[in-house]
Amino acid sequence: MISDGDWYTESSDELGLGFGLKIRGKLHEERSPFQTIAVYETETFGRLMTIDGLVMLTDRDNFLYHEMMTHPALTAHGNAARVVIIGGGDCGTLREVLKHDHVEHVTQIDIDERVTRVAEQYFPRLTEANDDPRARLAFIDGIAWMREAAADSVDLIIIDSTDPIGPAEGLFNEAFYRECHRVLAHDGLMVQQSESPLVHQQLIADMSAAMQRAGFAATDLLSFPQPCYPTGWWSATLARASARELVAPARDPAFETFYYTADIHRAAFARPAFMRR
Ligand code: AG3
């Protein structure tokens, strides 16, 4: 919602907090068949995309989220060739996945084609890798896609969704995770954005429990800064289909990143004392 004329603020009564960006103006707003998508020009964070009033990304800080949703999981897997992204319609996650040479194909499945079209228009850097012959875009329901996908056909599933309300709700439960587990190869991994480690601890615990009930052998939490999301601190949950070891990063990535390094990888998996309890 907008307040004071020239600020965009995402605030939560439930959490009692908000994050605001001074804006120069609204560039775009539309109601797609699924949700309301808006783009603003901010004073200091470049462009901002919101969906149903929630901040999805800004030019200035999306590298944090997109790098941490991809490089830790791809590195921990070691040689993922077949990757599926559920959600991620802005294509920022897709772009990072395609930086890995061992990836043979990536299928991005977002229910809302309009998010991708808006990203192409207003966030061209995020969609710049979409012509890569390894990339496939599908605009269908990710839950239905997963139900129909063949068993053992994917090495890494990345769930880049909005909060667990509205269209994304069905991506946060045991039934969906069970399908993901069936579709994954024996040594496969799944990673899902899992909200703020400071204020969503119950959700994080529930997600991890649901993943394990669905057949995943173990889960790990990684956290990273994300200034434009509630509390500025965000997490992803990494689940292993079987009891395999994760590959540790021996060196920095061979491609350009802005946040991810070998040291960041190790640090992201470290558990602060309060999270161990
Ligand atoms: N994924 C959205 C994460 C949730 C943000 N939540 C919020 N602002 N309350 C963003 C998609 C980026 N590819």
Image (cartoon, grey):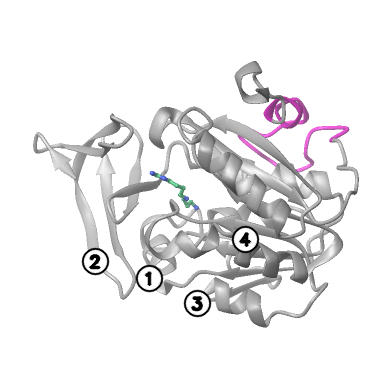
In magenta stretch: residue 42: no
Q: Residues within 10 Å of mark 3 (few under 14, many from 20)?
A: some
Where residue 240 sits in the image (x, y, percent)? 79, 51
Q: Residue furthest top?
A: 273
Q: Compare marks 1 and 3 and give the one earlier in the sequence.
A: 1
- Quadrant occupied by the N terminus: top left
Span of residues in magenta? 249-268
- CA gap, disc 3 and disc 2: 18 Å
Is 4 on the left-hand or right-hand side of 170?
left
Residue placed under numbered mark 2 in the picture: 30
**What residue is rendered at 58% in x and 66% in y?**
130
| Dot 1 beta carbon under 8 Å from ligand 1 | no
The answer to whether the residue labelled 1 contacts the one labelled 2, judged by CB atoms less than 8 Å apart, is: yes
Q: Compare marks 1 and 2 and give the one earlier in the sequence.
A: 2
Residue 114 numbered mark, or none: 1
- Per the image, label 2 sits on a secondary structure element best described as strand
- CA gap, disc 4 and disc 1: 28 Å
Q: Amino acid at mark 2?
A: Glu
Q: Residues within 10 Å of mark 4 (few under 14, many from 20)?
A: many
**What residue is rendered at 53% in x and 34% in y?**
201
Q: Amino acid at mark 4?
A: Glu
Q: Residues within 10 Å of mark 2 (few under 14, many from 20)?
A: few
Residue placed under numbered mark 4 in the picture: 174
